[in-house]
Image (tube, grey):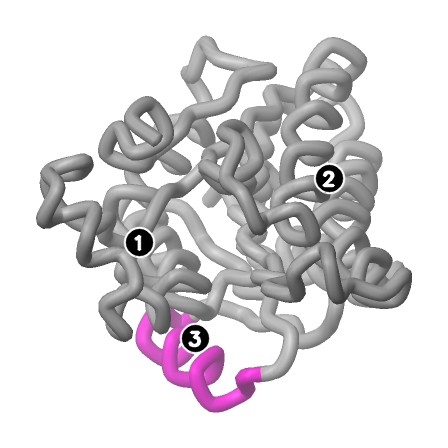
Amino acid sequence: MKTLILAGGSGGLGAALARLAVERGYKPVIGYRGNHERAGKLAAELAAPTVAGDIAEESVRDRLIEAARGAGELYGLAVLSGDPARVPIEKATADDLLASMRVNFAGPVLMARDFVAALGEQDGSIVLTSTMQGVGIFPGSTVYAAPKAALVHAAKILAKQWKVRINVVAPGVNDAGMAEQSVRSGKYDSFLKRKIIPRFGKPEDIARAMLFLLEPDNYVTGQVLTVDGGLSLKM
């Protein structure tokens, strides 16, 4: 059975992807940073191994890869981890910028690098998670969006450099993950009232896009799939 490492895979988006992966015959390995209870419930539901820790740390990346090897055939990686980094650039410190870069760029790229090294000559696929703010221009998003934009560019470089397929999914406003709190507060209701988007995104929207790019017979690499209901086209 092919394994899929889901780094940051215990939240809303990750859980949707994990469930869909199981339906399609994959074995997910769920990585998470701190929410033990949430990860434990998902792991029990899917009979999936879990690994706790920050993927910016080498030991955590090693444990994820070893867990995947122990669960089946090492094959796929989806990195869903991230931090909204909502500090405005006018108030941001160097520590704020570096913290965002660590979580939103360095950790995912290092995870991808180590995964590819572990694959060797085997077939495999990687999906990284950016954001519509990483492909479009949204005022006030510098601290968060700049590392996510760098992630997009890195993925294109690595797709050209590596044999393995590597793509990026850029979600829009979703009723899950980092945007969930903002959606529930009504912050984005104007997008619906002005008919900029037909509805808010769902975790399953992102999961389907990711699994499409992860499938073994996929013929896509070095691309960015923006899943935002057209929002970034109209802003």
Distance CA(mark 1)–CA(mark 3): 23 Å
Label whose residue precedes the other's in the sequence (1 or 2): 2
Q: Amino acid at mark 1?
A: Asn
Instruction: Identify the residue at image location x=26%, y=28%.
Output: 230
Q: Is residue 213 visible?
A: yes
Instruction: Identify the residue at image location x=47%, y=90%.
Output: 37
Give me the disc on residue 43.
3
Residue highlighted by disc 2: 112
Secondary structure at badge 3 equals helix
Residue highlighted by disc 1: 174
Instruction: Identify the residue at image location x=74%, y=27%.
Output: 154
State the extent of the magenta-drawn residues as a range: 35-47
Label whose residue precedes the other's in the sequence (2 or 3): 3
Secondary structure at badge 1 equals loop
Taking depth in this image into account, of 41 and 231 the one nearest to the observer is: 231
Distance CA(mark 1)–CA(mark 2): 25 Å
